Image (spheres, helix red, strand yellow):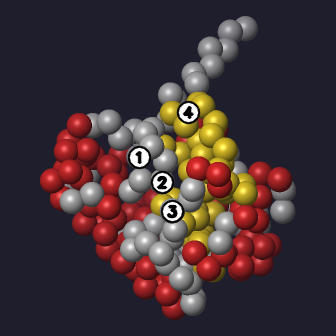
Amino acid sequence: MPPDARIAVHYADGPPFRSMMDLDPAQRAAVLDAGRIRGADRFRDSRYVDIRSRVEDELYRQFRETRGVPLRVRPHYAILGRSARSEARRVPGRAYVLSVDRLPAACVSFTWGDSFRFDDGFRLATGGGHPASRRVYPLDDLPDVIARWDGSTGRPGWQEIELQLWSDPQPDDYAVIELKRVDVRS
């Protein structure tokens, strides 16, 4: 796999590896109402929390079926490699970079594409009907899944992967990259 596919990147505007889904409903509502979450429009959808909860319940169920050993009920999310698109949405912010080879395989799963594709409405709206989507894979299957589907979406396969981290990474496990706006002039 290319070097970018050997790193997992978790993007966060605040402290890393914190899940809004770990908050009690009142705290979660306050975070959403404050409008500080940048990125996808889905965060502004009044059904977001219910959908995310159902999706994560399914991720958890399937991960356990793969003999995964979750240390958390709700995962943290990362992608393979850095994403210019994600970073543009998160400036200023931070990227937390972990070595895939050092992740505890028993505590990591992945999906082909955004795990939100487990929601029928999101999948239909985004054309997320890829044959490899809506399935949770154990980390050990990563090279085989990428090799099988590489290029099937017009992009390198590793760029389609979302990782679910079912444990809490410690500060020694990751490097921090400060994301800053770059003013490019000709």
Q: How crowded is mark 4: few (under 14 residues within 10 Å), some or many (20 or more)?
A: some
Query: Which secondary structure, mark 4?
Result: helix
Query: Residue at coordinates 63% horizontally, 63% vertically from top-left?
Result: 161
Q: Mark 1 points at which residue?
A: 40
Which one is earlier in the sequence, the residue at label 3 or at label 1?
A: 1
Look at the image and tell me whether residue 54 can be seen: yes
User: Looking at the picture, which amino acid does disc 4 mark?
Assistant: Ala
**Residue 70 image position (x, y, % from top left):** 49, 78
Q: In which quarter of the image is residue 169?
A: bottom right
Where, quadrant-wise, is the N terminus in this rendering?
A: bottom right
**Residue 44 image position (x, y, % from top left):** 27, 46
Instruction: Judge left or right: residue 142 versus residue 170.
Output: right
Which one is earlier in the sequence, the residue at label 4 or at label 2?
A: 2
Which one is earlier in the sequence, the residue at label 2 or at label 1?
A: 2
User: Looking at the picture, which amino acid does disc 2 mark?
Assistant: Phe
**Residue 183 image position (x, y, % from top left):** 62, 14
- Tell me, yes or no, whether the two marked residues, 2 and 1, touch with CB atoms within 8 Å: no
Nearer to us: label 4 or label 3: 3
Q: Mark 4 points at which residue?
A: 88
Nearer to us: label 3 or label 1: 3
Q: Name the residue under label 2.
A: 17
Query: Residue at coordinates 73% horizontally, 64% vertically from top-left?
Result: 102
- Tell me, yes or no, whether the two marked residues, 3 and 1, touch with CB atoms within 8 Å: no
- Tell me, yes or no, whether the two marked residues, 2 and 3, touch with CB atoms within 8 Å: yes
